[in-house]
Image (cartoon, rainbow, N blue to C red):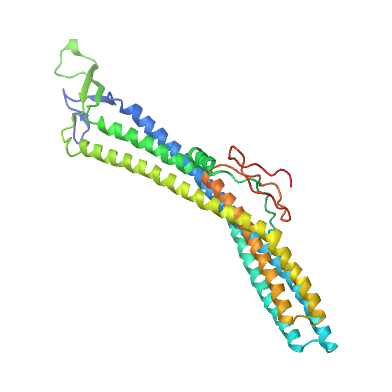
Amino acid sequence: MNYMLPQLVPMDPLGMVQLQVMQMVPINGTLALATRAAAAQSAAMRARTDEVSWALRNQVAMAFFELSATDRTLDVMRQTLRLLANITETAASMYRVGEGRQVDVLRARVEIARMTEDTIRMQAMRETMVARLNALADRDADIPIGTPLPPRFPDEFPERPWLDSVAALNRPMVRAALEEVRAAEAGERIARRALIPDLQVGVQYGQRGASRFQGDDMAGTQRMGSLMIGASIPIFARSRQLQLREEAAAMRAMAQAEVAVVRAETRGGLGEALAALTRARRLGQLYRTEILPQAEATVHSSLAAYRVGSVDFMTLLDNQMSVNRYRLELATLDADEGKAWVELEMLTGHELFDPNTIARHDAIAPTRSNSAGAPTSGGAP
């Protein structure tokens, strides 16, 4: 300080080299509160990262079950094509011997062409689903994927109170919202203590060489030290600190409202997923035990009756296409059940079944709940 310009030499006797260090020391407890707020924000970010992982897992599972339903649909279509070919051969044979009509043969061939078209369209959809699943897995889009094998789901449904309790404790989005409330509460307490002045402490060191105005006893380098103590005074408290209080209170209220919103959305999602799971399981059981067996028996009876001329060809064809439609709906119901289970897992942040098992579509398991309400694994397939 006090150097002459432009020579940049110390001005005699005021020029010197000076070093000053200042430190603000919060005496109102805001440092601990700021540490608490930062820790809560960090925990909230980690929880949101976990929520993103569950969301990505949910998207992959949805694509997996859609691909599984598509493959089962293609299998049903190919089986139907073979059955239609057999029916067409039967109609052609009856027409050759004079017991059938040419229109029956033509109608059967039209249905085969229509089914072939649907199969080609479904195959193109499968390629799209494979590309989507590869994209979600961060792989090249042209990597082939075999037929997905859906896992075996628990025989018992989880009870609603158990799902609500698990979601309230485990879902990352709920935990993140709660951590943000803690951070907002700490921020509000910091804002309320902003009127308390912060202590400032500093030290200063300076030195200068001998001056020509000094006597012989003052010759040599002179060193000086200073101690400084200050405080920050909130002069504009009404327009700054008090406004910060209102802002912090609003942030805390918003964080609490966010917790209520997340919990409400979670409860609503659990209800929807559980209802979808119940619907898919019960309808799937109904299709396997009653609708499909009766429809297939009707087709066999109609084919035998058609061969002896008791029913017309349109009745036989309609019965066969009904079986085809029921099988396609069953494949969709199985995929819907898997999607519902995965949705419950994402909403609760808890795995509810072993994904490494393989489902048996021919087995019908009863639906019941245990006393604890937790789902029980179905065991080895």
Question: Is 313 positioned to the left or the right of 211 in the image?
Answer: right
Question: Which of 307 and 85 lies nearest the eye of the viewer?
Answer: 307
Q: Residue furthest left?
A: 213
Question: In what quadrant of the picture does the N terminus appear?
Answer: top left
Q: Residue at x 81, y 75 (%)?
A: 304
- Please identify the quarter of the rendering in which residue 181 is found: top left
Q: Residue at x 41, y 35 (%)?
A: 40
Q: Residue furthest top?
A: 217
Question: Which of 137 and 339 lies nearest the eye of the viewer?
Answer: 339
Residue 339 at x, y percent in the picture? 59, 54
- Please identify the quarter of the rendering in which residue 315 is found: bottom right
Question: Is 231 positioned to the left or the right of 293 in the image?
Answer: left
Q: Residue at x 52, y 46 (%)?
A: 347
Residue 20 at x, y percent in the picture? 26, 25
**Residue 117 in view:** yes
Residue 94 at x, y percent in the picture? 83, 84
- Above or below residue 309? Residue 379 is above
**Residue 82 in view:** no
